[in-house]
Amino acid sequence: MKNKTLLAAALFLFAAVLPLIVTEFWVHVLTEILILGLFAASFNMIFGYMGQLSFGHAAYYGVGAYTTGLLMVKANVPLLVCLPLSMLSAGLCAAVLGYFCVKLRGIYFAILTMAFGQLVYYIIFQWYSFTGGDNGLQGIVPPEFLGKAANPYYFFTLIVVAIGMTALWIISESPFGYTMRAIRDNAERTEFIGINVQRYMHLNFIIAAVFAGLAGALWGPFNRSVAPDLTNWQHSGMPVFMTVMGGPFSFLGPLVGSTIYTLLMAFVTSFTEYWPLVSGVIIILVVLLMPGGFLGLLNEKFPFLMQKLSGAKETDEQGRQEP
Amino acid sequence: MDITSLFAQFLSGLTYGTILFLVAAGLSLIFGVMNILNFAHAALWLMGAYFSYTFWNWMQGNSFSFWLSIPLAGVAAAAVGWVIEVVLIKRIYKRELYEQLLITYSIALIISDTIKLTWGVTNKLIVRPEIIQKPVFIFGAPLDSYFLVVIAAGAAVAAGLWWFLKYTRYGHIVKAAVFSREMVGALGIPIPRIYTWVFTLGIFLAGFAGGIQAPIGSITLGMDTAIIIQAFCVVVIGGFGSLLGTLVGSLIVGEVLSFTILFWPDGAMVLIFIITALILIVRPWGLFGTPMRI
Amino acid sequence: MNDADATLLEISGLSKSFGKYSVLADVNYRLRKGEIAAIIGPNGAGKTTFFNLITGYHRVDSGTVRFQGRDITNWPRHRIARAGISRAFQVSNIYPRLTTYENVRQAILAQEKKTLDIITRAGGLAKQDTLELLKLTGLLSNRDTVAGILSQGDKKKLELALALAGKPEMLLLDEPTAGMSSEETHETMEMVKRLNAQIGLTILFTEHDISVIFGYARKLSVLYQGTLIAEGTPEEVRKNEEAQRCYLGEEV
């Protein structure tokens, strides 16, 4: 256990000193990595831990982004107040939509989440008077105390994301988190040990949406604007990519995936406009050749390293762990 | 709103519904038989539209260039589809849902950019033959005469598929496979070969639909992203794997869009998604799909 | 209301069909608290369906299931489990990707109603209870093995442990000793018998192993093609001609 805390602290410190050694452009990239990493980690609560594929998670990300954007632009609400309000609105949205989604499983769950995602997209897109329609909302600026440079907002994001990830970690290691794993492993059995699986899935769905909303809230001031695109199905595909790239079914996988994906995108788009082509090929290669994602690959090649880092006990061939 | 205008709306919805049917038919078939949701379906449809433009362009001297380019688009798309199936889809038959979705989604991305690379970003316009340049009037309502072609094509495809499924041996195999893959395999019929043919047929339909779409307005990049979601809605509403379901679903979507625009223009797509969500909640296998345990 | 003769489970007119195929037809059954009862019948007689209907796995077509005086017919599964009925499945229905320890702990945490806790570290919870239950069911040495690779017999033990974790009033065991060696069978059934004696746990099980039936069941019912054709002590049933004809005649 201690190992994991040390690892987390080391990562945090590493992330904190990076702005001192990279240019402003890369600080922007790093901020994006953090925000999308939180977004992907929230998605993973539904995917990796609960075992369902949500293809509409961007809806809650977008709702969070718009809540903050609208409050800041139209009512001058301070960012620190907007963050929890974004979480609340995303959570409420998920409370309503998630109620229906958790009645389904597998591909039907995926399609319904996608349909709801598109529903949210079109509502935002068409409600011109309120949301600005396809023009989006412009002029969302970080608060005074953070100024206009890249670094302060980066540190702010780092702190918020660190808190968010810590919260998600605590939840995933709690009895509730283990119940999610149980539901993923055998939802039927979980009913028979007395758990109302649908209700629990609903709660998890809401929790995941809340943190997606938080990530979205951070995006607005970072990007200086929000657009309906934030909620479309292509955006919903992003956390799926990232989680699979980084390592599905591990806590840090989404963050690792966000790092790889965002860095790759920044790199590739600097010399070609055909990022969709490149990313498509990469995803196919990852899915076919690296089913455990990047972390899975590390685990294969350097099992001792991974175990030391995660503090896990040695596992011999028969799956027995040494005491 | 008088009868003529309403009828015009109806025809408009019928036409759009037919386009949707042509796109969704292949999608439904592929999912029904192979249990794979082909995210790349609309991208291949768009590729078909571009193919038909190219064929029409190449055959400029030929008076049938316009008409020939349509089925040729289907064939070209089918060739691409065949390659995709053999190289990629084959590897993911038994994979998890998320892996299959990511693969087909990635194929969509690759196809989209391939279209951009091959045909560039300018819109493509196909010039119609004289015979279909002027509108026709049906009960006083004006209708783009090409739309008659569209509706006829849709009816022909529907009838062809129906005949195929009902009267040919391969059609019976496909119908059986929708119902139970295991049984068909157990009867000694090679499943992988069926999958290749079904996928290729599905993509032929997509390409053909693209060819049909091409003369309507112009061909532009990005048309596929809107259509794919609508095609999903059609297949959900109608029921995966059901020809009748796809037909009914596409007409429903077409007409709902057409009429909603009259009194709630902003809400047309919203309504479609509400209907889709309702179907998923109340009857996930769609109006005509086979009920299965969720 | 702790009268040992009190009826715990009362089933009347229970019927279930799947499509045109009638699996259970108008079954009446009664179980007293503290009983150890068994149901036997050839494969396809409806034993598992019987259990399925009691535990909410399927909806009943008609009839009622009353437990502790309450009508629990068609209640949702988790509610029936909370009402005090636990079930061990015929085909091990465990958590294959969790360790044996985590499997049992999960069931215990569920019983203790701690599963909505999103703050406490699960790793430190329910240690005592989990270890005790593992010891009781003979799984202690396998505690850190990933459950999916346990032997058949061990999976059955885990199945039992999961059912017991719910601290049930009544335990339904579907072929509890299938796949076990005779030693394991003896261990398991002795443990079940002890629980029955010590805490009054009511047991209803199905079995194909005749020695287990005669060794442990105090009440035996014979299910044949969806109806109960004989009931009584095992000795009485053994002498019952109809039972002999239907059941033993069917068995090769």
Image (cartoon, grey):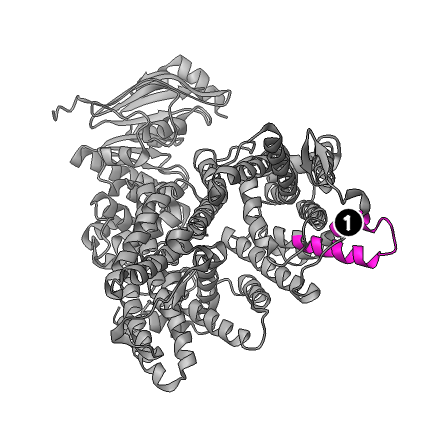
Mark 1 chain: B
Q: Which residue is mark 1?
A: B128
- Position of the N terminus of chain C by quadrant: top left
Magenta: main secondary structure equals helix
Q: Is residue B69 magenta?
A: yes
Residue B262, image x, y percentages: 52, 38
| Residue toward you, A186 or C155 | A186
Task: Give the extent of the magenta segment.
Answer: B46-74
**Circle 1 SS class:** loop
Q: Amino acid at mark 1?
A: Arg
| Residue toward you, C2 or B27 | B27
Q: Is residue C85 among what the camera can see?
A: yes
Q: Is residue C146 among what the camera can see?
A: no
> Is residue B152 placed above or below B48 in the rendered structure?
above
Residue drawn at x 23%, y 36% is C168
> Is residue A68 placed above or below A201 in the rendered structure?
below
Q: Is residue A154 magenta?
A: no
Residue C207, image x, y percentages: 37, 31
- Seen from this angle, which residue lies furthest top? C241
Residue A76, image x, y percentages: 27, 63
| Residue toward you, B200 or C40 | B200
| Residue toward you, C190 or C224 | C224
Q: Please give left or right for residue C73 compared with residue A266 in the image.
A: left
Residue A85, image x, y percentages: 26, 57
> Is residue A243 placed above or below C10 in the rendered structure?
below
Q: Please give left or right for residue C23 compared with residue A10 in the image.
A: right
Q: Quadrant of residue A318?
A: bottom left
